[in-house]
Amino acid sequence: AQKITQTQPGMFVQEKEAVTLDCTYDTSDQSYGLFWYKQPSSGEMIFLIYQGSYDEQNATEGRYSLNFQKARKSANLVISASQLGDSAMYFCAMREPFSSGSARQLTFGSGTQLTVLP
Amino acid sequence: DVKVTQSSRYLVKRTGEKVFLECVQDMDHENMFWYRQDPGLGLRLIYFSYDVKMKEKGDIPEGYSVSREKKERFSLILESASTNQTSMYLCASSTYTGDYYGYTFGSGTRLTVV
C-alpha cells in the first residue's frame, strides 16, 4: 500500500505568490518523521524541512513551512513569496521508527513538479 | 561542505553488461542507501547498508546487488544490465543529527541500458 501520496503531479504559481503542495501519509506508528525535498533539473535532492510526529509546532525554515495535521495524516508544504528559482520537483518523504522492521530508510511520494511563472 | 559523490553523472551500457555504480560519502555516516527514481513513481529503495559489510534489501532489489567494504563507499551492482534498469540512480547517506536522522543525497547517475 502506498505510504506517501502526492496528488498533484504538476502545479503552477505566479511569482511572489504563495503555493501549497499536498502530501498525505499512512502509518500505524505514533513516532515518525516527515521530510520535504526539492529536486531541481540538475538532479540533486535538496533538504527543505523536517517535522517530527511529536512536534507540537509546525516546522518553518525561511520561506518554507509545513502545515502538519496529524489527525488527517497530512503534511503539506507551503512556499511563501514564490521565486523563479523555486521551479523544481518537490518530494514528500516519511521515516518510520526502527520498530517498523528495517525502517531506517525514507519512503517517498511520487512528487509534484512546481513551475513558477514570471 | 559535506558531500555524497556519485562517480558518474551519465552512463550508457549494453544489455547484459555488469555495471558498477559507485558512491562515496565524506561525513562518516553509518547508513547508506541506493534509490531508483522513475517518472511518476518517485524514489524507490533498492538496497541500504547500516554498517560495513551489512546490507538489507529495499523495495525493489531484484536484479541488483550491493557492496560496502569500507564505511565511506557503497556500490550498486547490476549483474546483467537490462533495458528496464534504465533509470536515474540516487545514493544517499544518513546519520542522527541530534534531533532527527538527516539524509544527504548525491547528484544522481542517469543510466541508459541499450
Image (cartoon, rainbow, N blue to C red):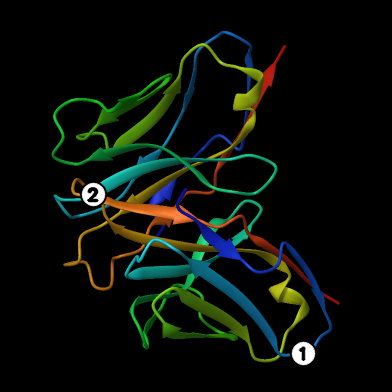
Query: Disc 2 residue type?
Result: Tyr
In which quadrant of the rendered image does the C terminus of chain A lie?
A: top right
Instruction: Write the residue at 63% across / 76% down.
Output: B21
Marked residue chain, label 1: B
Left-right relation of B40 to B29: right
The quarter of the rendered structure image containing the N terminus of chain A is bottom left
| N-terminal-most mark, 2 or 1 | 1
Which of the chains bears the disc numbered 2?
A: B
Q: Which secondary structure lies at badge 1? A: loop
User: Residue at (21%, 35%) from the top-left corner?
Assistant: A70
Q: Position of residue A45 (x, y in %)?
A: 54, 47
Q: Residue furthest top?
A: A16
The residue that mark 1 highlights is B17
- B88 in relation to A67, above or below: below
Kind of residue at badge 1: Glu
Q: Which residue is mark 2?
A: B100
B51 shown above or below B40 = below
Mark 2 to mark 1: distance in Å?
40 Å
